[in-house]
Image (cartoon, rainbow, N blue to C red):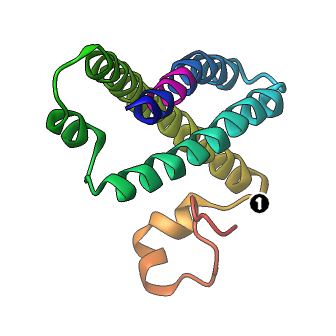
Amino acid sequence: MDETIKILREQTILCSKLPALFDELIKIMRDNSPELQESVSKIEKIMRELAENEKKAQDFLKRVNAPSFAEYLAAQKKNIQRDMAEKLLNKASEAQLQLKTQIAELKLLLKNGRNFVEFNLNILARTSASETYGNRAQRASQRTRRMFEANV
């Protein structure tokens, strides 16, 4: 049970650090700030530590022949250690739910940024909309590039 608490505590601590870093990254992306690399490197470091923690957790679960920590804890007798482990598991789950919403927001920001870059590349390449979307263009366009094409 001590190993379970140790793994879950480490996971909870790491997961609790990520929301603040993701908020920082979201703010940087919204402000178009150039300090993106530092924030990303902090997140990458914690994600590597989380991956190591996950490997430890999977090894432990294989050793005790349990599919998840929740089922492993449910099979244990009630005591203070089990209660502590359940609280840690709940905190880690809450942090992971918060991270899912932040990741969705980051994906949207990245998609908008990519669309902005594609739009500006089309403008720089002087891609004409009339050759792409006109009736005549559908029949006999000679251009190989289309407006808003990703591979400009």
Please name whichever residue, 75 or 117, is drawn nearer the observer in this view of the structure: 75
Give how far across and how far down residue 79 sits, in percent.
22, 17
Question: Which amino acid, by three-letter code, is at mark 1?
Answer: Ala
Which residue does the image show at 33% across and 16% down from the upper left? Answer: 84
Q: Secondary structure at mark 1?
A: loop
Mark 1 crowd level (few <14, some 14–19, many ≥20, 10 Å Cα) = few
Please name whichever residue, 152 or 77, is drawn nearer the observer in this view of the structure: 77
Residue 5 in the image: above or below residue 146: above
Give how far across and how far down residue 109 sits, in percent.
54, 33
Which residue does the image show at 30% across and 40% down from the upper left? Answer: 69
Q: Which residues are magenta?
A: 8-13
Residue 11 in the image: above or below residue 133: above
- Quadrant for the C terminus, please: bottom right
Q: In the picture provided, is 136 more to the left or to the right than 149?
A: left
Which residue does the image show at 70% across and 17% down from the upper left? Answer: 31
Please name whichever residue, 110 or 56, is drawn nearer the observer in this view of the structure: 56
Which residue does the image show at 43% across and 85% down from the upper left? Answer: 139
Give how far across and how far down residue 67 sits, in percent.
25, 53
The residue identified by callout 1 is 125
Give how far across and how far down residue 90 sits, in percent.
30, 21
